[in-house]
Amino acid sequence: MKKPLIPALVVVAVAAIAGAGFLMKGQHSPLQWEMKPRAVLQEFTQAHDPKISIAPSGDILLLAAGQKPQGAPVQLFVSRDGGDTFGDGVPVSAADARVDSHGENSPILVNGTRGPVVLWDQTGEGDSQIMCAHSMDDGGSFAEPVKVNDSKNASAYAGDLVANGKVLFAAWLDSRDRAHNGTTSIYSARSQDGGATWQKNVRVTQNACPCCRPNLAVLPNGHVVAMWRNVFPGQIRDMSCAVSADGGQSWSEPRRVAEDNWHILGCPVSGPHLAVSGKRLFATWYSQGTGKDPGIRLSWSDDEGATWHKPVIASHTLQDAMQPYLYANAGGNLALVFRARDPRQKDSWNQLRTYLVTVKPDGHISQPSQLPAQNTVAYPNVAADTTGRFWVAWNGNHTVQLLRGRNEAF
């Protein structure tokens, strides 16, 4: 399978900062940001594909992949001062691991009951594996990585990882079924001990787009939802979902999320993203549809994905909008980030920027707010707390950068 090149890197995070003149307002919203991003993790050579999260303690966790000889190629960095400074990197993968990380196929970070858990794609001699490592001391160290998939050369993309107490669920694109019609399978696995061991793999579907990673969410009742880009007859590549009501031991028949009817002879390398607010399941994804309304879609379901609200175009009139990432804070408010171009600037061929949209639990969304940046960006992700502070991460300019901001109305 041909995989995309590693994009240039930037990380952005958003947190409350005091001081007149230090914050700038975003376009069309009450969001306020630092004047420019700040380079971090500079000691981690060629750091890229950052993921940002907020630990239960309030610490800011920043995961990144990098290059040897800087120790392990996947490391976690912790900030205890809101992102002002980060400590030394904590090794996650083995030092000699051959980690495959490039945007859509990059390590995943979640908060477990005792500390962070990380999932990634690792290549060996003629095979490719899904690996997981967990921390039992709030990110101070990680246990020896373990393999999640139970077949050789099974993984294609690292997929996704979610936590429900001590129980973890992972899902990934898997080539073991050797599909011949331009699709691949999705398999899942469950860990009942925080990631130390993994149970037998279970197939979710066989008709997935081969380079669009799947996503997972856990509902309040413990049911697990998987979402992916499905290949329908006629090379229509629209979103589908399935539900597991028995802790990942079996999955429902696929349910079509929306009839975008996007006909494309190839994989767009852009998967969906899920988040839960109360009992409502939110989903976001990119589609060109029939060509009249390309952009980032946002929809929600109140019945575990059986039916979905008509999607809204969260990217509005922005062009080349791609790579959506959705996050729900503890209060149920959501933040959606993606990259796009403003058509009003330089005949729409300006550099790609990160945009953020806030989403209320009732589905009300804000106008996109452009985040300050100095270089083109790729693969943004976001975290937010209940006080209106945001942390957003993305790739750009061959370095990891940090930007902070707030929204008092959030």
Image: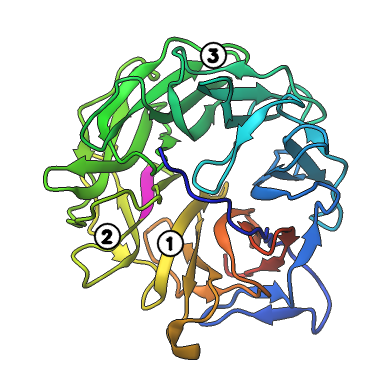
Q: Which residue is mark 3?
A: 192
Residue 390 versus residue 405 in the image, above or below: above
Q: Amino acid at mark 3?
A: Gln
Is 28 left, or right, of 37 in this rendering?
left
Is 211 left, or right, of 20 in this rendering?
left
Q: Amino acid at mark 1?
A: Met
> What residue appears at the point 73 percent right and 49 percent down from the top-left corner?
47
Residue 264, can we see it? yes
What mark, if any, has residue 322 been given in the picture?
A: 1
Q: Amino acid at mark 2?
A: Pro
Closer to the N terminus: mark 3 or mark 2?
3
Camera-side residue of 8 and 402: 8
- Confirm or deny contact between disc 1 and disc 2 (CB under 8 A): no
- Residue 241, image x, y percentages: 28, 38
Main SS of the magenta part reads strand
**Distance between the alpha carbons at the discs numbered 3 and 1:** 35 Å
**Label 2: how many Cα within 10 Å (few below 14, some 14–19, many 20+):** some
- Residue 224, image x, y percentages: 38, 29
Q: Quadrant of the C terminus?
A: bottom right
Residue 245, can we see it? no
Residue 87 versus residue 13 in the image, above or below: above
Closer to the N terminus: mark 1 or mark 2?
2
Camera-side residue of 401 and 101: 101
Residue 184 versus residue 316 in the image, above or below: above
Q: Quadrant of the N terminus?
A: top left
Is 204 left, or right, of 62 in this rendering?
left
**Distance between the alpha carbons at the discs numbered 3 and 2:** 35 Å
> What residue appears at the point 22 percent right and 69 percent down from the top-left corner?
291
Question: What's the colour scheme?
Answer: rainbow
Span shown in magenta? 280-285
Q: Which residue is mark 2?
A: 311
- Residue 276, image x, y percentages: 44, 44
